[in-house]
Image (tube, grey):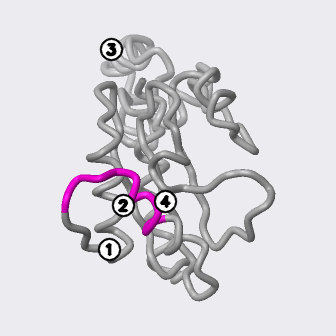
Amino acid sequence: GGVGKTTLDDKIMQKAKKERMFNDVVMVIVSQQSDPKRIQGEIDRGVGLTLEGDDMLSHGDRLCTRLVDQNSHILIILDDVWKALDLKRLGIPSGRNHKHQYEVIFTTRFRFVCEAMGAQKIMEIGMLSEKEAWILFKQKFGNFIDNPSILDIAKEVDKECKGLPLAL
C-alpha cells in the first residue's frame, strides 16, 4: 500500500464528476472484509436505486437493468479490492455481449485479483525511483531543504519513505 491507488481513484472520480463524463459516478471502498450486500447497496444508492429488503438477486437484476439502460452512463469505482468480486452477482454484467453504458474501475494490490475479475486493462502503479522521490520531496517541502544544515536530514527522511508517494 501507499503508492496512491485510492488517491488516483479520488482524482478520477472528481474529474469524471467535474467534467460530467458520466451521469452517475459511484465509488465504493471494498477493503479486506468485502461484504457483497454492502457493496451492492452502496452502488444501488449511488445510481439512485432505493430498494427494499436484502435479496441480492432482485437488487442485482434491478442494478443490471439500470446499468445497461441506453440513457444511463455510469462509472463505478471499486477501491481497495483484496479478493476477486463476482460482479455478475452484484448486478454488474460483464463480457463482450453487452452494450456497455457503464465503466468499472477497480484498484487492488494483487495482479491475480485483476486476472480473476477479467480486467480488460491492467495498469501497475509502482514506487518512485530514488530520483523521482527526491523531486517529489523537494516539491512538497520547498528548496530550503537544499540548505547544507538541513540537507543530510532531508535525504535521510526521503530515504526512509522508500519511494512511497503517500509517505513523502
Check disc 4 and give the amino acid type. Ile
Check disc 2 and give the amino acid type. His
Residue 149 locus on image (x, y percent) = 31, 19
Residue 104 locus on image (x, y percent) = 57, 55
* Label placed on residue 153: 3
First of labels 2, 1 by sequence position: 1
Q: Which residue is mark 2?
A: 59
Q: Is residue 108 left or right of residue 53?
A: right
Residue 165 locus on image (x, y percent) = 45, 32
First of labels 3, 2 by sequence position: 2
CA gap between label 2 and label 1 equals 9 Å
Circle 3 packing at 10 Å, graded few (<14), some (14-19), many (20+), is few
First of labels 4, 2 by sequence position: 2
Contact flag, marks 3 and 2 (Cβ < 8 Å) = no
Q: Which residues are magenta?
A: 53-63
Q: Which residue is mark 4?
A: 76
Location of residue 167 (image quadrant):
top left
